[in-house]
Image (spheres, grey):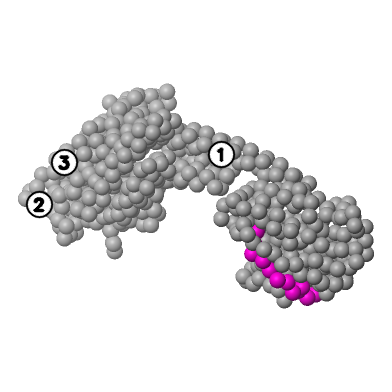
Amino acid sequence: MRRILLLLALASRLVAQGFTEIQDWRVHEGDNPAWARPDFDDSGWAQSPGPRAEDRLRPRPMNPETGWHWYRASIPISARWAGNELALGLPPFGEAWEVYADGVLVGKFGRLEPNPAGPSIRHKAFRIPTQVTAGHFLHIAVRRWVGPTTTRLLCFTAGLSRRLHAPLIGPAELIEDHEQLHTVEGFIEDAPWLVTYALLLVGCACAFALYNLDRRQTDHLIVALYCLCFGAPPLLGMLLRTGESMMIRSAVPFLLATFYLGAGGLGTLIVARLCVQFGRVVGAIAILILVAGLIWASSMPLQWSGADLKAFAAENWLQPAAILIALWELLRRRAWSVVPAAASLGVFFLLQLISVQTGMPVVFLAGPAAFDIRSIGPLAFVGATLVILYSRSRAERLRHARAEEDMAAARRVQEMLLKSDGFSAPGFRTEAIYRPAREVGGDFYQLLPGDDGSLLVVVGDVSGKGLDAAMLVAAAIGAINGNPSRDPETVLSCLNRALIGKMRGGFVTCCCALFRADGMVLIASAGQVPPFAHGLEIDLEHGPPLGLFEDAEYAVNTAQLSGTVTFLSDGVLEATNSKGELLGFERLALLSVKPASEIAKEAELWGQEDDITVVQVAYA
């Protein structure tokens, strides 16, 4: 309603006071300050419709060596304007320029010296000093630079180009209101795209929130970047066109254009991530599109050249081609949930290509706003993609939750199998510490007292980690407890046969010791870290690891040991600090005289890389 009242008020003032369109212009290439003088004879100049914005997708007819154009026009001063201060209203046109009235500089746009540069184009109104309009005729001259500062940043100029008009002269307030109204109308026309950009930023926030929930899901991050690159630069560009301090050739507009044009490649990359068979092909095309967009953006502040047009054409042809490849695969796989996302982006790219190549209109006026049917594509694409990724992310979280529940259950089972709290064997002091590197580990130990006052100690390590290693631990413990023999070599042989065919390329190291009541200790080793006594390694004859050779044999080492005997897994030996240094045998020998809990803590602080197991046994 406010806009309608403003139009009615402006129309009533037009009827009462009126303005004049300046139609009869002459133009000449070159640069000469004398051409601003009111008495200059321009009859030999070519006729022209005047300074205006040309078609942005075609090179301008100009002298590439100078880039200077001068426009001149003579206007009779109407008696209706007597007593009014006059102003000149100019439509948006690019580069940098100055306007003179009877040889007096009345306004300028951008800068001409020392290096011409202009901001984003806009409607302008310049008041003319009253002493200049004292005569019967007014001579207008426009000095314009049309050299290499031209930009084609559509996001900076959208809406304005549809409000082009011939230069105007009339009462100052009327002309200023007229140009301001055109600016407001340009923003109103852009409202559908502004809503699209704002919704894309909302999509960016949603995608980034999903990524923040699970940093492993990089697809969410790519979608967030796509929305940011597509939605933010145009909105920032619209802010730039409200001021004249930011020149188009500066770094900020270039970066905004680069991000804006890079959105096409990111969108294609998202579709590539949704593919399986042709994902790499579509991804490679997405990279080419990003490179083409960068080339196009880098040439946009200059006059359109062959390389510029080729990069532009490459980007617009590659995008539909990539989407067609993706759609072909998705339809063949009957991935119906993914087809809407790829199809919506494909429609956007196709409309973009048709619009550029044929000039077919894609913008339709809907009241004061201009509806661009291409704006539907990005919103539909982002919406469909977020639904797909959310569904996938939710399913993945459910799978992770179930896996974590399974791992927690396995951890509880393993803790019960290895539980040593409250363990006691008559005639012995024992301490056992187990620190898995993951939820479940591959180390195991068993302390089995005998009726004859002996104690059988088994300490082992399954190669690998995780649930597979934990399952082998359970199998090993079951085999140990199911074996009636207490001879170390027999225990290892039986355990070896039980593990044959279950290792899937791995192996198990193990040390088995029988502490007899008479103080003799029988020890057999299958490649395990040797035990320590009195800070020294116990010299053993090692057999091969378990699970590799069915006919493996294991020797028994007999020793009379006193004090504490410490059994260790290689997770203690191979603890690694930030400098890449292993804990090693020398440090381990010094640690072996300490309690098991301190040994495990020292290994963890040094840098745990593997499961840590420490078992200590001493005669009471």
**Does residue 171 lie above or below 66 as drawn?**
above
**Residue 523 seen:** yes
Magenta span dominant secondary structure: loop
Estimate how packed mark 1 is, as few (under 14), some (14 to 19) or many (20 or more) residues with alpha carbons within 10 Å.
some
Residue 496 position, x and y percent, is 66, 56
Q: Which of marks 3 and 2 is in front?
A: 3
Reading the image, the residue beneath label 1 is 396
The Cα atoms of the two marked residues, 3 and 2, are separated by 19 Å
**Residue 344 seen:** no
Query: What residue is drawn where x is 67% and y is 41%?
Result: 406
Residue 436 position, x and y percent, is 71, 55
Camera-side residue of 523 and 359: 523
Q: What residue type is labelled 1?
A: Glu
Reading the image, the residue beneath label 3 is 49
Residue 100 position, x and y percent, is 24, 51
- As helix, strand or loop, the secondary structure at mark 2 comes to loop
Would you say the residues marked 1 and 3 are in contact, meaning their CB atoms lie under 8 Å apart? Answer: no
Magenta stretch bounds = 535-546
Estimate how packed mark 3 is, as few (under 14), some (14 to 19) or many (20 or more) residues with alpha carbons within 10 Å.
some
Reading the image, the residue beneath label 2 is 41
**Does residue 395 lie above or below 257 as drawn?**
above
